[in-house]
Image (spheres, rainbow, N blue to C red):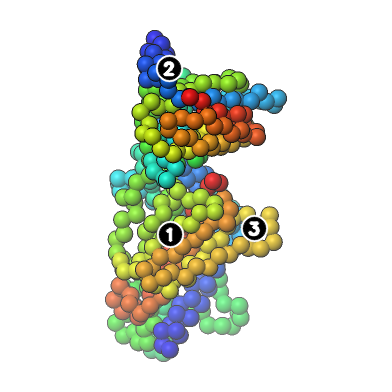
Amino acid sequence: MKKTSLLIAGLAAAPASAASVNVTIPRLNVAEYHRPYVAIWVEPAAGGTARTVAVWYDIKKGGAEPGTKWLHDLRSWWRKGGRSLKLPADGVSGATRAPGTHKVALPADLKPGQYTLYVEAARETGGREIVSVPLTVPAKAASAAGKSELGAVTISR
Amino acid sequence: MRIKTVLLTAAALMIAAAPATAHRQWLLPSATIFSGTDAWVTVDGAASNDLFFPDHQPMRLDGVKAWAPDGSEAKIENGATGRYRSTFDVKLDKEGTWKIGTAMNGVSGTFKVDGAEWRVGGRRGPPPAGANAPQPNFVASVDEIPANATDLKLTESASHNEIYVTAGAPTETVFQPTNKGLEMVPLTHPSELVAGEAARFRFLVDGKPAANLKVSVLPGGKRYRDSDGLMEITTGADGVAQVTWPQAGMFWMNTSYSDDKPSVARATARRLSYTTTLEVMAP
């Protein structure tokens, strides 16, 4: 039920004309694979507060533990704003994703200007990688790619 | 001249009384940055030459305390002392920055009674090397110095060894200085130390900036390289030491300060020291 409402909220917040980012999680041939924790955030290019767009973690972990224990492994995101975010955050928190390409809407209310979009991934018993892409609002196409824990990160309008 | 002599005497006494003082005292937290709702930090404490390898003496746990982000004292749990290191846990059940460590205060030195030399403070060390050498006389504290004592040469010593760990968002309460003795107030929060970036720390003596203080910064893991990696930084007039972290990892930071302004009556000198262990993250 909650999932449905989150999806609806996500759709409502992202009009068809808004920009989005496609994040590719590579398929890795390793003995013990766990889906990575991923954080996506935007910072003004001239410096300023980070705004978290999405964070994918073990949001459905059972018991008293809300699945946040390992979020500090997303160490850049944690330092730049994750640690002061109240979780779960509506429209931001989500479950971990399987390998493949995932489309995430960027906030429609970003003021025009220059930003940097960051995607950070950290995997249990695996590595960690951060990929950054310059983001212009209104959005222009841009892309970058990771080498190990992330594939292509592509901004599209 | 007189101060120098007193200090030398005191230093010699401290070495004789407790061999561990010749080694580096360190606290090593399992991590300094925590997320989640049930965070625990587990800490090792020891004295050894090489950081952070416990191969000499364990830290005594009776003086270890912890302070929660609101400044209240917190519990030290699961304390145990092994041959080379002690270990204990702190449950980080409040969000913010915690302080964990030891503060040791004491007076040591010498005085004479009817021409015979007596010592104050410290524990009785091993007997002098020569079997025929006279055994020194000891009193445990300044209060026990007899009224007819002469030639008092007493040094006050105060040493802090503290670490800081942060659960969730960082806070500043535990850095509030008491304005007594040697203290460190971070200008860069200890949870925001990153390899390749500069961090700044202000040192205070009795609440005033401590200029020209020599601060030593040493990375752990000497066994895996040739150089000890020592960085020596001198504080400016504002008492600030700036460190640019050459790599990620755990770093030991230490400084000491001596003057002739003891806070204890009858002492003529004081020696202050401050030690911490800082975790530097990869960018």
Residue B275 % position (x, y): 46, 61
Q: Is tag 1's residue or tag 3's residue first in the polypeptide sequence?
A: 1
Looking at the rendered structure, whether the residues under marks 3 and 2 are on a common chain is answered as no
Q: Amino acid at mark 2?
A: Ala
Mark 2, residue position? A16
Chain letter for the residue marked with disc 1 in the picture: B
- Chain under disc 2: A
**Which numbered tag is attached to residue B222?**
3
Q: Are marks 1 and 3 on the same chain?
A: yes
Q: Nearer the viewer, mark 1 or mark 2?
A: 2
On screen, residue B250 versus residue A81, left or right, reads right
Asked if badge 1 and badge 2 are on a common chain, one would say: no
The residue that mark 1 highlights is: B200
Q: Is residue A75 left or right of residue A149?
A: left
Residue at point 68%, 54% (across, down): B224
Q: What is the secondary structure assignment of the residue under circle 1? A: strand
